Image (tube, rainbow, N blue to C red):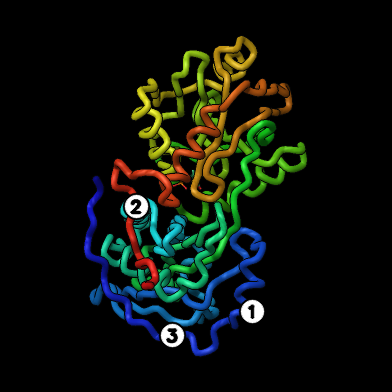
Amino acid sequence: METQAPPASFTVIPNRHPASEEERWLAMENPVFGKVFTDHMARATWRDGEGWVDRRIVALAPLPLHPGAAVLHYAQQGFEGLKAYRHEDGSIWLFRPEANAARLAATCRRMALPEVSEEDFLGALEGIVSADRNWVPGTPGASLYLRPFIIATEPSLLVQPANEADFLVTASPVGAYLSTAGDGVSIWVSRGFHRANPGGTGEAKTAGNYAASMLPQREAKEHGCQQVLFLDAREDTYVEELGGMNLIAVRADGSVVTPRLGGTILPGITRDSILMLLRDEGRTVEERDIALAEILEGLESGEIVELFACGTAAVVTPIARLVSDDFDVAVPPREGESVADAVLTRLTDLQYGRAEDPHGWMRKVVDAPEG
Ligand SMILES: Cc1ncc(COP(=O)(O)O)c(C=O)c1O
């Protein structure tokens, strides 16, 4: 059971010009991921010697940022991604926000930024979700995607840790994730590019990792693939993760294997949750180095029967094909319910309050309306 720390209080200064009900309804009808934003944002400011001050929920607005702000030049930044879910009774819940708080704190340490405490992290989330509760969709599978982030704002071109930073949270309604089970996505295995080096920033959730993944992601698209899979930088041999998701393989004997976290892979909260649910079911779960050759041979021999990607945004995405310059290997379709489908149902039932929550992962942030 994770801690339930009392959240910090964020002063609410309501948006005086919120979207009308009709505008909101139109915006929420079919939102493109991350393109629609709610009326508010959470914000707190940090200055060296003063600490975190000015915790507030304010109208969403462009940021006045000095052109010399360190984040614009040296990407001193960290971010998170999690969702708020509306349950059938109208109450609103977060999934394992304490885990996102801990990961952001780790990112802050790696990026020499001031740490955002769990209390501030939860206070900002509760503040914005409460202020924008009408933006949390009630349609099946839809949710409010929350984007906490911290940026170095000090105007300084010196390459050194900034002495001013801002922590913000924006919120975006996102639509139902449609399972592609049955066919699944095609994955481009990047050979020339790596995502992370030992000792680098691979396990931090920081902007530069994603900037560096855009060219290989474009390469994937040019080869008709939806996502890119990275191999380890040291030996160019072991599978690591996708541009924005972790990778899990299912073997014919029902056991599950996934790349171990070793500093170059983002410790996904969906990954961790799925591994726990699979262990709860009594499956053997291995976290270890997995050579690309082991996966390709396993698919050919039938030893590996399923591959899927997982992350907050798309939850669980079955993989249908692995492609690179020198191979194109299909994952044979599964007969009956796949592990990916079963775990997607298990996880989303829990997130939407349709199933019990044995690990105490859900945290209520807005009560059900009365009456
Ligand atoms: C590189 C990378 N790997 C994995 C994940 C999955 O992490 P989580 O399950 O916490 O969303 C993400 C998404 O945040 C990611 O950006």
Q: Earlier in the sequence, mark 1 or mark 2?
A: 1
Q: Nearer the viewer, residue 27 or 259?
A: 27
Q: Nearer the viewer, residue 183 or 233?
A: 183
Q: Is residue 110 visible?
A: no
Place of residue 72 in the rendered image (x, y in percent of width and height, measured from the top left):
52, 67
Place of residue 239 in the rendered image (x, y in percent of width and height, measured from the top left):
53, 28
Q: Amino acid at mark 1?
A: Glu
From this viewpoint, which residue is outermost toward the front? 371
Residue for badge 2? 362
Q: CA distance from mark 3 to mark 2?
A: 27 Å
SS at circle 2: strand
Q: Amino acid at mark 3?
A: Pro
Q: Is residue 39 above or below residue 141?
A: below
Residue for badge 3? 14
* In the image: residue 286, left or right of residue 116: right
Image quadrant containing the N terminus: top left
SS at circle 1: helix
Q: Is residue 27 above or below residue 204?
A: below
- Label 3 or label 2, whichever lies nearer to me, is 2
SS at circle 3: loop
Q: Nearer the viewer, residue 313 or 168?
A: 313
Identify which residue is drawn at 51% across, 22% down: 250
Place of residue 329 in the rendered image (x, y in percent of width and height, measured from the top left):
69, 22
Q: Which mark is residue 107?
A: none
Q: Is residue 70 visible?
A: yes
Q: Is residue 203 above or below residue 124?
A: above
Quarter of the image holding residue 154?
bottom left
Q: Nearer the viewer, residue 210 or 137?
A: 137
